[in-house]
C-alpha cells in the first residue's frame, strides 16, 4: 500500500475535485458532464487518464467518458461514448419520463466562461431617510431605541379638566 500523501503527489495532475450542480452535472474545462442527479451539490472526484474521464463519488464510479485531448495533453478537445454506472445514489424523485442513456444529453460543450467583474462598492449611492421624525417629537430614551418611537400627546377631554 502506498501512503495517501504520496499517491496524491503522484496523481495530482490527473485528479480534480468538482461539485455537482442541482441537476447532477459538473463543469469541467468548458464541458458539462453528467454524474448523478441524486448527489446534487456533492463533491465528486474527476479522473483523467489514458483517454478516459471518470467521475467518482466516495470511490464509487458514477460515469465514464472517452475524451480526446489537445496537443498539450491537458485540455479536452472532444468527449464521446458516455457510460453511466448503476449506483445506490439514485434520486428519490421519480422522473416524469423514463429516458435511456441515449435519449438525453449526458455531456455538451458549454460556452467559455468569462471572469466576472466585481461590482464597485456603492460609494456613489446615498441612502435616503424613509421617515423624517422631528427631534422634538422623539420619546424619552429614543437615542438608543428605534427611530420609529416618538412621543404622542393625547388630547385631554373636558371631563378631566374639572
Image (tube, helix red, strand yellow):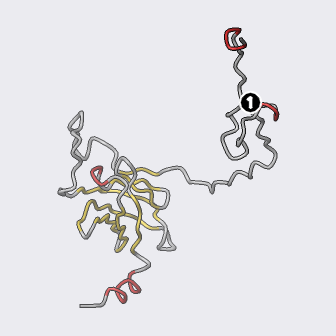
**Helix, strand, or loop for circle 1?**
loop
Which quadrant is home to the N terminus? bottom left
Does 134 sit above or below residue 70? Answer: above
Instruction: Report the front residue among 154 and 41.
Output: 154
Location of residue 103 in the rendering, given as x and y in whole percent from the top left corner:
27, 41
Location of residue 128 in the rendering, given as x and y in whole percent from the top left corner:
78, 36
Instruction: Report the front residue among 27 and 105.
Output: 27
Location of residue 105 in the rendering, given as x and y in whole percent from the top left corner:
34, 45
**Badge 1 is on which residue?**
131
Q: Quadrant of residue 152?
A: top right
Q: How many marks?
A: 1
Rendered residue at 36%/47% (across/down): 23
Location of residue 148 in the rendering, given as x and y in whole percent from the top left corner:
68, 34
Q: Quadrant of residue 82?
A: bottom left
Instruction: Report the front residue among 39 and 53.
Output: 39
Residue 68 placement, left or right of 97: right
Residue 82 placement, left or right of 22: left
Does 160 sit above or below residue 91? Answer: above
Does 87 sit above or below residue 71? Answer: above
Residue 145 placement, left or right of 23: right
Q: Quadrant of residue 83?
A: bottom left
Rendered residue at 34%/56% (across/down): 80
Which residue sits furthest front?
162
Amino acid at each position: 500500500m502506498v501512503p495517501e500523501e504520496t499517491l496524491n503527489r503522484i496523481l495530482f495532475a490527473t485528479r480534480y475535485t468538482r461539485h455537482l450542480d442541482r441537476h447532477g452535472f459538473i463543469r469541467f474545462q468548458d464541458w458539462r458532464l453528467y454524474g448523478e442527479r441524486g448527489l446534487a451539490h456533492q463533491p465528486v472526484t474527476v479522473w483523467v487518464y489514458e483517454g478516459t474521464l471518470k467521475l467518482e463519488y466516495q470511490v464509487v464510479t458514477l460515469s465514464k467518458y472517452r475524451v480526446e485531448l489537445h496537443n498539450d495533453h491537458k485540455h479536452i478537445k472532444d468527449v464521446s461514448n458516455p457510460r453511466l454506472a448503476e449506483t445506490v445514489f439514485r434520486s428519490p424523485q421519480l422522473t416524469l419520463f423514463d429516458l435511456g442513456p441515449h435519449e438525453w444529453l449526458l455531456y455538451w460543450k458549454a460556452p467559455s466562461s468569462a471572469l466576472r467583474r466585481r461590482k464597485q462598492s456603492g460609494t456613489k449611492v446615498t441612502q435616503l431617510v424613509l421617515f423624517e421624525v422631528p427631534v422634538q417629537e422623539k420619546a424619552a430614551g429614543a437615542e438608543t431605541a428605534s427611530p420609529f418611537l416618538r412621543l404622542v400627546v393625547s388630547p385631554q377631554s373636558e371631563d378631566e379638566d374639572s
